[in-house]
Amino acid sequence: MLGNVVSAVLEPHPQFQNIQTVVVTIAVAKTFKGPASRTLTFRQFVWDPRERLSPAGYHKTEELVLFLNPVSEYGLTSPVGMEQGQFHVLRDAKGNQYALNGRGNIGLFSGVLSSGTVNGVRLSAQARTMLSRPGGKVSLGSFEEVIQALVGGRQ
């Protein structure tokens, strides 16, 4: 899912008052897999004690690509692999958009490309170049192209 953070509020879990959570609402611009909706609200456990006084790394208006785990029986979810599944959308001085996760995308595409196609979808030269890199920021457009190929070509 690609979208912008509308709000991120720290609050105790409704069933377990000693567990700190962050409730995040995203204005969804694009859904890559699963049901599409205009907004998505989810509750995430706050793992890092240093983030118990801030919204656990979510900032209002920030643009993100998120890959979320299924919601648990306790109503909690989080990005897959924590910071590995949370990509910040960055812009350079020319307005080009890039995606970068909390691990600097290191190893993100290892083993994904063995030919010029993914799931039978022929990838652009830019996407193939992106998949050959060991890490660093990646073009948002190429990133979206590869995501769509990996989830079955959904537009």
Image (cartoon, rainbow, N blue to C red):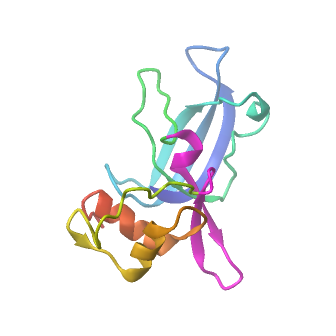
Q: Is residue 102 magenta?
A: yes
Q: Quadrant of the N terminus?
A: bottom left
Query: Hey, which residue is sitting farthest bottom in the picture?
Result: 94
Q: Is residue 93 magenta?
A: yes
**Viewport quadrant of the C terminus:** bottom left
The residue sitting at the left extreme is 120
Kindly identify the residue that appears in the image at 53 percent across and 62 percent down.
Answer: 134
Residue 109 % position (x, y): 44, 58
> Start and end of the magenta stretch?
81-104
Q: Residue drawn at (65%, 58%), measured in percent from left and top? A: 62
Report the label total. 0
Q: Position of residue 23 (x, y in %)?
A: 60, 36
- In screen coordinates, is 130 left or right of 59? left
Q: Residue at x 33, y 53 (%)?
A: 33
Q: Position of residue 73 (x, y in %)?
A: 41, 21
Residue plotted at (60% across, 80% down): 96
Q: Position of residue 41 (x, y in %)?
A: 51, 42
Task: Kindly indicate the quadrant of the structure image that contains residue 136.
Answer: bottom right
Horizontal side of 13 relative to 67 (left or right) equals right
Considering only vertical position in the picture, is 85 above or below 62?
above
Whether 49 is drawn above or below 28: the answer is above
Is residue 88 found left or right of 65 in the rendered image?
right
Relative depth, front residue between 121 and 3: 121
Q: Is residue 99 above or below residue 73?
A: below
